[in-house]
Image (spheres, helix red, strand yellow):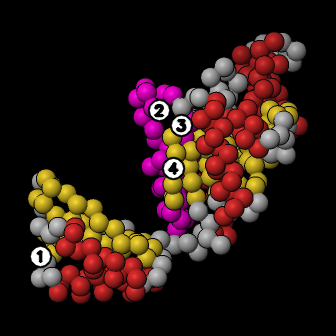
Amino acid sequence: MTTHFGLIIVGDEILSGKRVDKHLPKVIELLAARGLPLSYADYVGDDPDRITATLAHAFAAARATGDVVFCTGGIGATPDDHTRQCAARALGVELALHPEAERLIRERMQDIAREQGVPYEPDRHDNIHRLNMGMFPAGAAIIPNPYNKIPGFSVQVGAGAVHFVPGFPVMAWPMMEWLLDTHYAGLHQKLAYTEKSVIVMGSMEAALTPLMLDIEANHSGVKVFSLPSVDHPEYGRHIELGVKGAPDAVNAAYPALLAGLHTFNAKLGPELVR
């Protein structure tokens, strides 16, 4: 079974344009550095029903096909943070204060009091409220947060999992790196991924479709991609045509793609490797 990686980005601020999403390109970068591709990404606002439905789909994919999904945002304790509650609802379990999360949150509160030069008051209303950040779906495991100790959480579902981290990149990115290197090191390079493509000048996609279908039919493990452009400042009207997948499969399919293009007498530009 091939492991697919997915990403869920939660927050009205992304959909409204108040914040520019930085997670998608970073997750692609983190995965690519380990020879892994991102298979899909979903954006959802701060609507509990939509978050619940999105997470239910993620849990189902984790259970059915072993998907690994990262979910960023909405795990705080303010009224617009719904992700923890929605995760529990999607799983059909209760929220419970995780003992290790409680310890870490209390430790963080003591650190803050010490930095401010004031006594730590564990029973103060705002300190008790902060413990809500450790209320996770029953059975969840924690994800360590090296920035401020407030943990995220993971839910294992079948062979897959959904991992929940804060929306702040300074916290989320090292937490996702830790997950990739601690729990998925065995997958590094096993799903090594590459792309090879060539700029085809002036051609139409419809004319090249039979070649694209032939390449996919005769070279299992690769996908053919076609990226047309009509107003490129250097190449003008052109198509970037290529193959992507495991290196061995790509290395076998790409020469066949070039040979097929030569039968069309296509004018070819630069070749690209990613």
Residue 40: x %, y % from top left: 51, 54
Q: Is residue 27 left or right of residue 81?
A: left
Disc 2 and disc 4 in contact, CB within 8 angstroms: no
Task: Specify the amino acid type for callout 1.
Answer: Lys
- In space, the residues marked 3 and 1 are separated at their CA atoms by 43 Å
Q: Nearer the viewer, residue 49 or 236?
A: 49
Q: Which residue is mark 2?
A: 14
- In space, the residues marked 4 and 1 are separated at their CA atoms by 35 Å
**x 58%, y 28%: residue:** 46
The first of marks 2 and 1 along the sequence is 2
Task: Specify the amino acid type for callout 4.
Answer: Ala
**Other-residue count near label 3 (Cα within 10 Å), few / some / many at <14 / 14–19 / ≥20:** some
Query: Foreground mark, 3 or 1?
Result: 3
Q: Which residue is mark 1?
A: 267
The first of marks 3 and 2 along the sequence is 2
Q: Nearer the viewer, residue 126 or 95?
A: 95
Task: Specify the amino acid type for callout 2.
Answer: Ile
**Residue bounds of the magenta highlight:** 9-37
Residue 201: x %, y % from top left: 13, 69
Disc 4 and disc 3 in contact, CB within 8 angstroms: no
In terms of image quadrants, where is residue 123?
A: top right
| Image disc number at residue 44 | 3
In the image, residue 231 sits, relative to residue 202, either above or below, namely: above
| Image disc number at residue 41 | 4
